[in-house]
Image: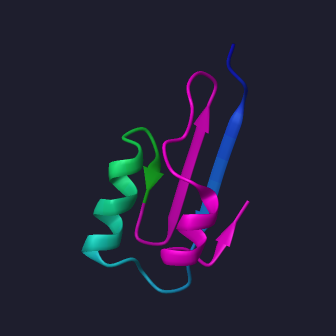
Amino acid sequence: MSEYQHYQFAVDEPLTDEQLAESRALTTRACLTRHSFVNTYGWGDFKGTARMLVETHYDAHL
């Protein structure tokens, strides 16, 4: 059984190429830019953890 999951992150300063690649490695379905990450799951799970992304890449998580 799956659950609805929505992940949205934002950052003030643009991500580096390395940070962008690390974020992309977590999911290929996200709408990913140097300033934001948005992904919705209706089936399956996010492979990363929101806490880790806020600690290492992004300034905010919704």
Q: Is residue 39 magenta?
A: yes
Which residue is drawn at the image coordinates 52% and 65% (left, top)? 36
* Residue 11 placement: quadrant: bottom right
Position of residue 62 measured from the top left corner of the image (x, y, whole percent)? 73, 59
Position of residue 38 measured from the top left corner of the image (x, y, whole percent)? 56, 51
Scheme of colours in the image? rainbow
Which residue is drawn at the image coordinates 39% and 77% (left, top)? 15
Q: Which segment is the magenta one?
A: 33-62
Report the quarter where the N terminus lies: top right
Position above or below: 2 against 58:
above
**Residue lying farthest to the bottom in this orientation:** 13
Position above or below: 45 against 21:
above
* Left or right: 54, with 23 as reference point: right
* Left or right: 22, with 31 as reference point: left
* Left or right: 16, with 60 as reference point: left
Which residue is drawn at the image coordinates 49% and 72% (left, top)? 35
Position of residue 14 measured from the top left corner of the image (x, y, whole percent)? 42, 81
Position above or below: 3 against 52:
above
* Residue 9 placement: quadrant: bottom right
Position of residue 12 measured from the top left corner of the image (x, y, whole percent)? 56, 84
Q: Is residue 60 magenta?
A: yes
